[in-house]
Image (cartoon, rainbow, N blue to C red):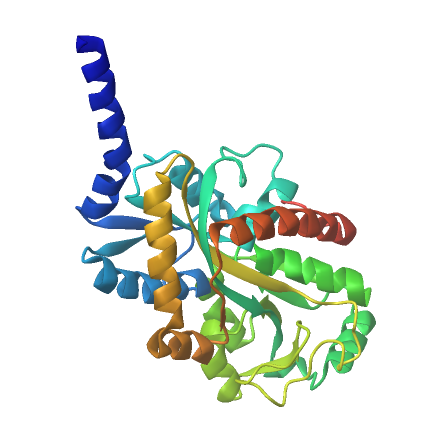
Amino acid sequence: MKTIVMAATLFAFSSIAPNCLSATYPAKPIKLIVAFQAGGAPDIVARLVARKLSESLGQSVIVDNRPGAGGIIGAALAAKSAADGYTLFLGTTGTLASAPCLYSALDYNPVKSFAPISLLIKAPFLVMTHASVGATSLRDLIGLAKSKPGQLNYGSGGNGNPTHIAAEMFKSAASVDLYHVPYKGATTALPDLLMGRIHLFFDVPAFWLPHVHSGKINALAVAGPKRIPQLPNVPTSAEAGLPGYQVSVWFGLVAPRGTPNEVLALLNAETKKALATKEIRTALSEKGFEPSSSSPEEFATLISSDGDKWCRAVQASGATID
């Protein structure tokens, strides 16, 4: 009889434990690791979403910037964190899709180390130049680059960063030779592009938009399937004469593998609510992002399929880590 009572008690506890967990979570601040510099595109998205989640969850969601090595330092840190719902990670195309194709050894596995929560945004890349380059169209730029092989340079957010891979993909698609100048993040490269010390940059619109609108930087093409509302006069790469060049990226929320399903479900629901608000949709859209929430299963499928796609792109472009 004692055994039966004990078993019944254990069963009853196990059946209510998840509900107790979801009812008490979160009981303390949540850390959101961003593997890039403050002020960059991932950081912008993370802080907008974190602020809204803080309001709905009743606990602070604190952004923790851990830049370095194209994002893999922050990703590895997040993967090794406790799976208790109090550490989240802003996963990106670079950290969860292209990194395995570029690094021979990673301290994490994009699929096995993380539990997807929700996609957050999608965004196409822009092909941007300093005015001193003298190219007013994508065709002009390609012609100029072919006439001066290796003399035009491009900046990137670091070796292995999608801004690096996007430029290498452009070199391959346009059959041109450009010189790579890596930086410790896109924000670090901005002053040099504004001064004309570097000629080209390939990135999502985000914080580049004010400088494009001011005329300090020329946006020659949107490397996506359609024009973006923020730059209606900038053609797509296909319209500009390079149909084979399309580069878009995404950001999303993940947690360390093993995080309780009830916590993941709550975070997914609150993230969807945040992205559905006019405040967040407007703030993201103004930066050139397309708000795009998803189920955990849909995000898992995207991570896997994009991993295959970016590996093929990396191989075709010949991009390597210097």
Q: Is residue 92 above or below residue 187?
A: above
* 251 to 238, vertically: above or below: above
Quadrant for residue 268, please give it. bottom left
Where is residue 282 shown, x and y percent of the image?
Answer: 40, 80
Q: Residue 276: x percent and y percent?
A: 39, 71
Residue 308 appears at what percent x and percent y? 69, 47
Does residue 160 appear in the picture of this structure? Answer: no
49 displayed left or right of 3: right
Q: In the picture shown, does residue 57 fall above or below 27?
A: below
Left or right of 183, for residue 84:
left
Quarter of the image for the C terminus: give it: top right
Q: Quadrant of residue 75?
A: top left
Along the line of sight, the residue nearer the viewer: 298 or 109: 298
Q: Looking at the image, which residue is at 42% across and 54% down?
A: 36
Q: Nearer the viewer, residue 148 or 76?
A: 76
The quarter of the picture where the N terminus appears is: top left
